[in-house]
Image: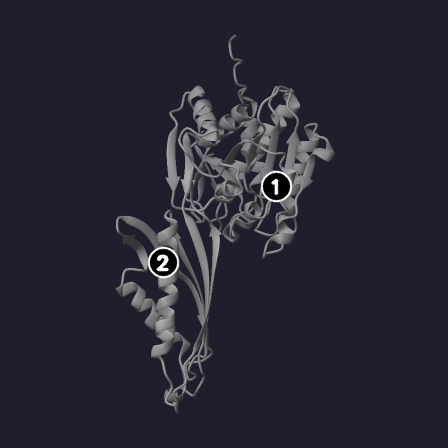
Amino acid sequence: MKTPALPDIDPAAALKLLMNMLPIAGLSGHEGNIASFIRQRLRAAGANASAITTDNANKRSPLGGEIGNLIFKLPGTFPGPRRLLMAHIDTVPLCAGTKPVRRGKRIVSGNPKTGLGGDNRSGATAILYAATEILRRKLPHPPLTFMWPVQEEVGLFGARFVQLSKLGGPKLCFNWDGNEPHRVTIGATGGYVITIKIKGLASHAGVHPEQGVSAIAIAGIAIADLFANGWHGLIKKNGIRGTSNFGTIHGGSAANVVPDELTIVAGARSHDRTLRKKIVAEIKAAFERAVKKVVSSEGKRGSLTFEPDLRYDSFKLPENSPPVAAASRVISSLGLKPELHVTNGGLDANWMSAHGLPTVTLGAGQMDVHTVNEKLDIANFTQGCRVALALACER
């Protein structure tokens, strides 16, 4: 029996939907407006209101937030394992106020002070287009769940705290968040965010600096220690790679006051769990040594609070796993050559895989994200929409 042809898309309609979604504000924790737009489009295409829900991820997230993850479920018109299509809807602050315009083969922000927001409105559009086309055209499909996670940009909190009971038990999971539609991301690094608080002792820096304990001096000694011993920046140990970074430092009050408090937010990443834990341990040990080295004239030392948070664990799916095979099969059917890939960034797929839902990530045209030079490749976006609809309808 001949396999039915996969449905194609209307590129102009998909692009119009994208241009409508890009300007809608949706900073992390404030995704209410974009979620309402998606809900309205689903309802207009014929979705039952009861099939569209939100979960309680925002109530469990440390950020709080307006809403949880938006979820839409469809029973299948033919039997098969349930498929999950997902793409986060929050954007970084740099994209607030974007005014998307088309320039040749790409879309850019017409506001030179903002990014575009293609990360991840391109992915969110691709799966919304697939859902509405299935509804509008009454396309045959297996059981489906569509999810638009919140708070990806600030720690993958939507995926981390997803209410799994609302997803319907999907077996094949696909996430859109990238550029090239033929690239199948099957693995990603793991990462810690580390909050380091140093408590020193204030004194007059011009009169009696020796009576103080400088929190900044402690931090400087610790970071220099890590740099000298190969635990800062790109880290290579026994052929295994990792990274560390000190992203923000806040402290001090005036030039004539020995700073008594300092807060640092650092990061540590590696695909290798053992090395990742070792990086965190080395950072902690360096700060503990530094605390002991800075002593006031009266023999007083500072103190340290060290709080590592595993924001996402690393994962790598087997190349023959069901979601990888399905994505590769559909991409090949569209005339593209699947390319398996492992990334050094974190994805919602990290947490989905940790929840027992192995998830591959696919692309829909994003380029130069998180910058004012961000752009979106229209051809790759269109192909990303084709992949989304085909994966949703494949037997």
Q: Residues within 10 Å of mark 2 (few under 14, many from 20)?
A: many
Quarter of the image where one finds residue 163:
top right
Kindly identify which numbered label has been placed on residue 15.
none
Q: Is residue 113 visible?
A: no
The residue wearing badge 2 is 279
Left or right relative to 336: residue 52: right
**Circle count:** 2
Q: Tag 2: residue type? A: Ile
User: Is 10 in front, or is 104?
Assistant: 10
Quarter of the image where one finds residue 336:
top left
The color scheme shown is one colour
Above-or-below relation of 348 to 332? below
Secondary-structure class at tag 2: helix
Give the percent coordinates (x, y) of residue 341.
38, 36
The residue that appears at 60% across and 22% down in the rendered structure is 141
The reply to whether discs 2 and 1 touch (Cβ–Cβ < 8 Å) is no
Q: Is residue 224 visible?
A: yes
Secondary-structure class at tag 1: helix
Q: Residues within 10 Å of mark 1 (few under 14, many from 20)?
A: some
Real-space Cα distance between discs 2 and 1? 32 Å
The residue that appears at 34% across and 67% down in the rendered structure is 223
Left or right relative to 9: residue 226: left
The residue wearing badge 1 is 164
Give the percent coordinates (x, y) of residue 150.
58, 46
Q: Residue furthest front?
A: 274
Give the percent coordinates (x, y) of residue 34.
62, 43
Q: Tag 1: residue type? A: Leu
First of labels 2, 1 by sequence position: 1
Quadrant of the rendering where the C terminus is positioned: top right
Q: Residue furthest top?
A: 1
Give the percent coordinates (x, y) of residue 101.
50, 39
